[in-house]
Image (spheres, coloured by chain):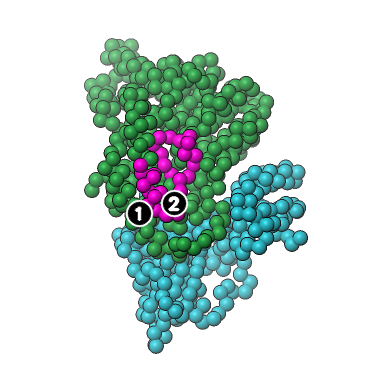
C-alpha cells in the first residue's frame, strides 16, 4: 500500500540528497573532527561547511550556531542558560500553547521556585500583545515564545515580541522548530537572542538540532564536557547528522519559495475541498498568519482516533488533537487554550504537507475522507443533521 | 500508536449492531461529549424475555466503538439476568484484550448495559448514597470501588485507565487513593502537598480569568456570569442572560467555567451557582 504522508509536523522523510551527503561519514570519513591528523581534520572542514549552510538558512553568522541533539535540547539549553546567567531574576514568560519541551521544562522550574507566566491565546490561537507587554517585569529573565505552532501552524509575531523584551533587558528565545525551512527567517533583521531548530522537521535525520545564540549573548552550556562547539556544548560531534542537517538547510533555503507557493496551494486545496464536502467542519487557528504547510480541521461529533485509524486503512498519515490519541484523557493543550468546543476538539485532525507531497495524494485524501467522517457520524449518538446544538464552549 | 488486537480492529472497522432499536424496551446513555466517549444503547426483548435486538451508537475512539460492538454481540440472546453478569473484563477478553489506557471503554460498555436493563426494570439509575468523585468525568465512588474490586487495581493511574476518574484536573487523586486503600483494607493514607495561593491572589486571579477567558465565550451565546463571592475554594457565581434559563447551564458551569478556573487558578476550586 502506498503511504500518503501528511504528518510532516511530526517528522519528515530524510531526503535522498541529504542521505547521500551523510553516507560517507558513516564509512570512510569516520575521523574525529577534533583530531590533529589530516584524516580527522578533513571532517572538521566538512562540519564547518555544514555550519555555514545552517547559518545561511536563517541569516546568521556560523559562530552563532551550536549543534545539539534535538529541538528539546536546544530549548532546554536556551532557557536554562538564561536563568543561569541572570541568577537574580526569577520570572519566565511563555505561552500556553508552547511545545512540551518548553512547557514541561517551565513547569519543572516552577517547582524549583521560578515564577512562570503562561500567556493565554484567543480563539484563533493569537497572543494579546498588550497582555504580553504587561507580563514583562524587572524580574523577568527570559521570554520563550514559539515562532509557529506545531498543531495549528499559527505564527506568533516573535520579531515584535523580541523588541519589547530587549527594551527591558530581557532575553528572548524562540522555538522555531516548525517555522525553520517553511517561512523566511533572517536573524539580521531581528533582535532574537536564541532560536531552536530541529533537523528532522526539515528533511534531515532525527537526533540533530541547533541552538542559535546571538553574538554577545551570555551563554552557559547545558552539556559540559570537551571544547566542542567552542565550549558551548560538550560531546563529540554527530558528524553524519551535522552534514545531513547542513545539506537539508541548503535544500530548504532553495525550496522556500516552493513551500510558500506549491505546498501552500496544495494545503489550501485540501482545506477548501474538505470544508466544502464535510458539513460541521472548521479550521482551528488564525488562517492569515499560518505556516503554508499546515491545516488543523475539526470534524464535529466524531472522535479523532477513529478518523486516523480509518485513514490508516488507506495509508493516509495525519495526527489528531483528540484525547484518545494522546494517552491523556483531555484534548490537546493547544486546542483547549484556544477554547475550541469539546464537540470540535475531539474530532480535530492535523494535516501537515511537505514539498514532497503530490497533487494526486491530496486528491486521494479529498476522495477518501468525507465518507469516513460520514460513516463515523452514522455511529455517533450526537450526530443529528439539521438539529440546532447548544455549544458548551 | 495503540497496540490493538485484530479483533478490536475488526469490530472497529466493521462494527456489528450499529443504530437504534425501534420502540426499545430498555435505553441507556452513558458518557458525554466532553469526556470524549459516549454510548447510547437500546434493546428489545422477545417473548421469552431474551434480548432479541440490541444496538449501539458510540462517539469515541476505536476501542470504544469495538467494545460497544462486542458488547451487543455478547448480550444478544441472553436473558437480562445473564446479561447483567457480563463484566468489563468479559468485554475486553472477547476482543482479545485492550490496552490498559483503554480499559475504560469496556467499563463504559458494561455501564451502558446495566443502565439499559435498569431502565427496563424501572430500578433507580444510581444507588442511594453514591457520590461523584471525579467531577471532570462524572465518575462515582461506587464505580471506582467496583473497578478496583473487579480488576484488582492498586494505583490511581490504573483507576484512571479503567474508569477515567482522575484523568482531568487531577483534583480527585487523593480521594481515589483513599477508595483504593479502603477497598483493599489498608488505612495508610498519605496527604499530598501543593503550594497555596493567598486569598487575595486567588480572588484576583478568579476575577481576571472570568473576565478574560469565560465571559467573552458565554456572551457569544447571549449568556453571562457574575462573580458573587469566593469562600475558601467555593466560587459562588450567578448566571445571567441566556445562561440563567439554559438547561445546559449546569454543564457549562462544571465543564467550562470550573474547568477553566481549575486549569488557570487552582485545581481545588468548586464553582457553585447562587440564586439571586
Q: Pinpoint residue A268: horizontal percent, then vertical percent.
A: 38, 40
Which residue shows up at 45% across the image and 36% down it?
Answer: A290
Q: CA distance from mark 1 to mark 2?
A: 11 Å
Q: Chain B takes which shade in the image?
A: cyan
The magenta-colored residue range is A269-296
Which residue does the image show at 52% across and 60% down from the upper left? A389
Mark before the other along the chain sequence, 1 or 2: 2
**Vertical order, A150 against B117 (above or below):** above
Residue at image position (30%, 11%) is A37
Q: Quadrant of residue A184?
A: top left
Shown colour of chain A: green
Callout 2: chain: A
* Chain to which the residue tagged by mark 1 belongs: A
Mark 1–mark 2 CB contact (< 8 Å): no
- The residue where tag 2 is placed is A281
Q: Nearer the viewer, residue B141 or A236?
A: B141
Left or right: residue A116 versus residue A355 is right
Task: Find numbered disc 2 in the image and state the secondary structure of the residue it sits on.
Answer: strand
Q: Which mark is residue A370?
A: 1
Q: Nearer the viewer, residue B251 or B269?
A: B251
B237 or B195, nearer to the observer: B237
Please say whether residue B142 is one of the residues in the magenta stretch: no
Residue B184, x across and y down, in percent: 55, 64
Circle 1 residues within 10 Å: few <14, some 14–19, many ≥20? some
Left-right relation of A331 to B206:
left
Amino acid at each position: 500500500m502506498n503511504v500518503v504522508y501528511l504528518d510532516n509536523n511530526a517528522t519528515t522523510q530524510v531526503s535522498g540528497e541529504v542521505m547521500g551527503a551523510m553516507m560517507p561519514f558513516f564509512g570512510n570519513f569516520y575521523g574525529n573532527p577534533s583530531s590533529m591528523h589530516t584524516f580527522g581534520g578533513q571532517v572538521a572542514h566538512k562540519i564547518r561547511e555544514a555550519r555555514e549552510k545552517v547559518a545561511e538558512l536563517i541569516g546568521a553568522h556560523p559562530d552563532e550556531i551550536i549543534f545539539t541533539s534535538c529541538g528539546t535540547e536546544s530549548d532546554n539549553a536556551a532557557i536554562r542558560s538564561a536563568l543561569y546567567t541572570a541568577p537574580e531574576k526569577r520570572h519566565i514568560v511563555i505561552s500556553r500553547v508552547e511545545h512540551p519541551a518548553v512547557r514541561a521544562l517551565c513547569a519543572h522550574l516552577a517547582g524549583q521556585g521560578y515564577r512562570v507566566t503562561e500567556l493565554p491565546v484567543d480563539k484563533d490561537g493569537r497572543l494579546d500583545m498588550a497582555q504580553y507587554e504587561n507580563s514583562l517585569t524587572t524580574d523577568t529573565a527570559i521570554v520563550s515564545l514559539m515562532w509557529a505552532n506545531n498543531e495549528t501552524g499559527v505564527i506568533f509575531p516573535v520579531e515584535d515580541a523580541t523588541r519589547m523584551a530587549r527594551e527591558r533587558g530581557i532575553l528572548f528565545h524562540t522555538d522555531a522548530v516548525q517555522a525553520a525551512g517553511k517561512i523566511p527567517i533572517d536573524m539580521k533583521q531581528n533582535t532574537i537572542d536564541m532560536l531552536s531548530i530541529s533537523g528532522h522537521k526539515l528533511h534531515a535525520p532525527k537526533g540533530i538540532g541547533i541552538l542559535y545564540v546571538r553574538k554577545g549573548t551570555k551563554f552557559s552550556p547545558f552539556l559540559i564536557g570537551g571544547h566542542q562547539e567552542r565550549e558551548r556544548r560538550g560531546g563529540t560531534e554527530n558528524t553524519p547528522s551535522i552534514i545531513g542537517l547542513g545539506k537539508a538547510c541548503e535544500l530548504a533555503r532553495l525550496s522556500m519559495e516552493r513551500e510558500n507557493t506549491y505546498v501552500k496551494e496544495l494545503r489550501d486545496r485540501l482545506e477548501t475541498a474538505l470544508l466544502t464536502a464535510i458539513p460541521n467542519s472548521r479550521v482551528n487557528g488564525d488562517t492569515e498568519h499560518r505556516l503554508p504547510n499546515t491545516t488543523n480541521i475539526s470534524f464535529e461529533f466524531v472522535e479523532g482516533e477513529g478518523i486516523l485509524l480509518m485513514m490508516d486503512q488507506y495509508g493516509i498519515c495525519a495526527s489528531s488533537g483528540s484525547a484518545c490519541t494522546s494517552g491523556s484523557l483531555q484534548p490537546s493543550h493547544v486546542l483547549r487554550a484556544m477554547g475550541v468546543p469539546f464537540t470540535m476538539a475531539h474530532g480535530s485532525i492535523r494535516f501537515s504537507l511537505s514539498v514532497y507531497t503530490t497533487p494526486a495524494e491530496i486528491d486521494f485524501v479529498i476522495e477518501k475522507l468525507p465518507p469516513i467522517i460520514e460513516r463515523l457520524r452514522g455511529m455517533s449518538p450526537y450526530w443529528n443533521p439539521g438539529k440546532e446544538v447548544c455549544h458548551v464552549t | 500508536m495503540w497496540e490493538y488486537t485484530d479483533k478490536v480492529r475488526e469490530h472497529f472497522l466493521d462494527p456489528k449492531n450499529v443504530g437504534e432499536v425501534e420502540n426499545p424496551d430498555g435505553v441507556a446513555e452513558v458518557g458525554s461529549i466532553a469526556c470524549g466517549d459516549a454510548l447510547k444503547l437500546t434493546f428489545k426483548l422477545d417473548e421469552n424475555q431474551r434480548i432479541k435486538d440490541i444496538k449501539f451508537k458510540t462517539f469515541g475512539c476505536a476501542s470504544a466503538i469495538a467494545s460497544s460492538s462486542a458488547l451487543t454481540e455478547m448480550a444478544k440472546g441472553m436473558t437480562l439476568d445473564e446479561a447483567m453478569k457480563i463484566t468489563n473484563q468479559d468485554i475486553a477478553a472477547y476482543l482479545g484484550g485492550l490496552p490498559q489506557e483503554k480499559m475504560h471503554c469496556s467499563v463504559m460498555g458494561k455501564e451502558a448495559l446495566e443502565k439499559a436493563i435498569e431502565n427496563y426494570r424501572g430500578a433507580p439509575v444510581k444507588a442511594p448514597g453514591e457520590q461523584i468523585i471525579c467531577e471532570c468525568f462524572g465518575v462515582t465512588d461506587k464505580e471506582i470501588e467496583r473497578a478496583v474490586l473487579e480488576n484488582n487495581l492498586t494505583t490511581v493511574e490504573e483507576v484512571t485507565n479503567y474508569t477515567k476518574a482522575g484523568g482531568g484536573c487531577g483534583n480527585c487523586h487523593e480521594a481515589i487513593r483513599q477508595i483504593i486503600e479502603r477497598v483493599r483494607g489498608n488505612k495508610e493514607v498519605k496527604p499530598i502537598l501543593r503550594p497555596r495561593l493567598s486569598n487575595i491572589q486567588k480572588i484576583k486571579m478568579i476575577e481576571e480569568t472570568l473576565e478574560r477567558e469565560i465571559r467573552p465565550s458565554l456572551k457569544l451565546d447571549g449568556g453571562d456570569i457574575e462573580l458573587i463571592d469566593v469562600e475558601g475554594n467555593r466560587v459562588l457565581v450567578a448566571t445571567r442572560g441566556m445562561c440563567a434559563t439554559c438547561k445546559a447551564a449546569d454543564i457549562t458551569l462544571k465543564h467550562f467555567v470550573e474547568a477553566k478556573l481549575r486549569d488557570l487558578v487552582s485545581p481545588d476550586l468548586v464553582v457553585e451557582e447562587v440564586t439571586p
